[in-house]
Image (cartoon, rainbow, N blue to C red):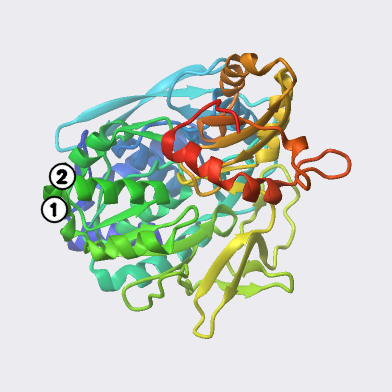
Amino acid sequence: MSLFDAIARHASLTPRQPALQGSQGELDYQSLWQQIQRLADRLQQAGIRRLALQLDNGLPWALIDLACTRAGIVVIPVPHFFSPAQQAWLLESSGADALVGPEHEGWQAAAPLLLMTGAADEQVLPLWRRTPASLPELPAGTAKITYTSGTTGQPKGVCLSLAQLTAVCESLALRVAPAGVEQHLTLLPLATLLENLTGLYVPLLTGACSRIPSLGELGFTGSSTLDPAMLGQALARWPSHSLVLVPELLRLLLALCANTPALAERLKGLRFVAVGGGKVAPELIAHARALGLPVYEGYGLSECGSVVALNGPDADRPGSVGRPLPHCQVTIAADGEVMVSGSAMLGYLGEEAPAIPAIATGDLGHLDDEGYLHITGRKKNVQITAFGRNFSPEWVESQAQICPAIARIVIFGDGQPANVALIQPLPGSQSQLPEQIARLNQHLPDYARIHHWLPVALDQHPGLLTANGRPRRNEIYHHFSRQIDQCLTQGLTGETS
């Protein structure tokens, strides 16, 4: 059953069942279905082909996304955690001819969109139009272009079909079904594919309710700054049965439970908590379950339509990321790389769409005797922060070449809530580092910035550099691991090592 067949069915059988709830109001399934059809007609009549969606989490984001998808208009979510330069690149490279969100240079105001976000609540959204300078060809069937976090300076657009997204959602619904989820609370940005599917499509497919507060109400600023007190208040205000978390959010949730017993008691109503998007320590899962939180680890990537494997109530092996979902197959290449077939993207935006029998994930892992997938590391140096943001340290290190005081720099942030840079300053230039690093950070998205740094003399330690002076990343990490850990735990910056 397609997503929209399911919504229409719920609208017929349980018309007054809440479908979407947020600070702007509430929509039952009957009202939601009417809104989707009305908005889809309006957008089709406007002749829109590709719409960029740059809104905060809330009912309007959900309605625009659903209406565009229903109308056959390609949706292009604009992540708020992208830098302004990356957002501009997304709008330019995608060929978007319409934008719902803040004004951007070169866009013209069009007739605004009127949304009903409750029984008598109207909301007017600005609609911007332009004729794109270029229109990159899309693979046939593209319904959504989701941009990666940007492992290089320019994020890549992943083209996905509605059929693929539906297959992922149906598999997720089956895996989570034993938990009996009736209400889901979105904590991650809907502009990320993971929450787009798990927080919006899966609840609507199953007849559940998606509760969508704004990111500000949750305490978020940027993509990696979060006010714990506000998050605790939001969790108390929006009791729900399921959550999707990145590792750092899980750590924060456990800390909140330890400091606020009343919140821990409220959270016992949770039935399923998925965690993924980065490395998850087995100890973190064990701690959560000791507190009575039903936390299950999963794994996926945008090129495979998000989730590939997930533990669940009926199939659970802590330490693994679960068995592959029914719609896809996982194999392990001779070099240990995880390969995924049956769930491949249509292709990257602007590139010729090849026949993709399997996606090479870049991750290393193995399948155990019972089919559970274990991820053991990254094939390359791409790092994933604890907030689930991908970045290439080489990219940031190359950007640091604009800093005259830096002779060598090596950045570590994999699985961490903050990035640490080991910097070898030019002789006599150490005092200039704070100002130059601050200037460098202004040009980087927040997930790739240098949060802490330590001056080190890499060339004074044998084995840390290659014969031509290039840093040996693994050797450097092991040599300075104690200082890196101390830097993260104590927030040190600029102390000599």
Q: In the image, is 487 to the left or to the right of 196? A: right
Q: Label 1 vs label 2: CA separation?
A: 7 Å
Q: Is residue 140 visible?
A: yes
* Residue occupying the point 34% across, 45% down: 37
Look at label 2 and name its amino acid.
Ala
Q: In the image, is 6 to the left or to the right of 128? A: left
Tag count:
2
For the residue pair 123 and 253, the one nearer the viewer reads as: 253
Q: Position of residue 101 (x, y in %)?
A: 43, 26
Kindly identify which residue carries mark 2: 236
Mark 2 Cα-neighbour bin, 10 Å: few <14, some 14–19, many ≥20? some
Residue reaching furthest bottom?
369
Q: Is residue 261 above or below residue 420?
A: below
Q: Secondary structure at mark 2?
A: helix
The disc label shown at residue 430, or none: none
Q: In the image, is 306 to the left or to the right of 61? A: right
- Quarter of the view holding residue 232: top left
* Residue occupying the point 54% across, 80% down: 368
* Residue occupying the point 45% across, 47% down: 69
Kindly identify which residue carries mark 1: 266
Mark 1 Cα-neighbour bin, 10 Å: few <14, some 14–19, many ≥20? some
